Image (tube, rainbow, N blue to C red):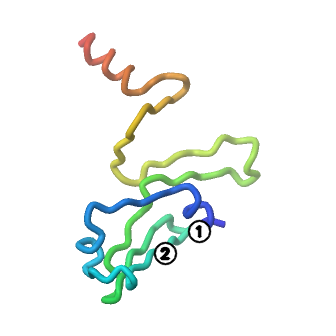
Amino acid sequence: MHAYLEHKTTTHEFSNAAQCLGDADESAWAASFDGSTSNVTLSSGSGVAAVVPTPLKVTHAANCASVAPTLHLQLDTVAMGRLMVGGFDVAAKLEELSAGS
């Protein structure tokens, strides 16, 4: 199920995939997701190029219903667009707070 959700909810875009993977042959590129560690392994014809944590990890309670899931930022993450937390626009609130100091 982890791999299915990873494929359906996340798009990874690389500035230069050939440089990242060390191989210009796109047919040799591969990625695999390990749901138990939340790591993505990137590889090419020459072997494993990198093992990195996913930027976002969602942890669900044992019963999957009565407790809200927890969002973990496993990497420094840039949010493109609005980030609403508890009804607050985080960027707008930070700008408001910094203007008042």
Q: Amino acid at mark 2?
A: Ser
Residue linked to disc 2: 32
Q: In the shown orientation, is residue 59 left or right of residue 22?
A: right
78 shown above or below 2: above
Q: How many marks?
A: 2
Which secondary structure, mark 2? Answer: strand
Write the residue at 49% across / 29% down.
84
Whether residue 90 sits left or right of residue 2 in the image: it is left
Q: Quadrant of the C terminus?
A: top left
Which numbered marker is on residue 3? 1
The local secondary structure at tag 1 comes to: helix
Q: Real-space Cα distance between discs 1 and 2?
A: 8 Å
Q: Name which residue lies at 68% across and 50% down.
A: 61
Q: Are marks 1 and 2 in contact (CB under 8 Å)?
A: yes
The front one of 91 and 13 is: 13
Rendering coords of residue 2 (x, y %): 61, 65
Q: Position of residue 99 (x, y in %)?
A: 25, 13
Question: Which of 60 and 28 lies nearest the eye of the viewer?
Answer: 28
Decide: few, some or many residues near mark 2? Use Cα within 10 Å; few <14, some 14-19, many ≥20. few
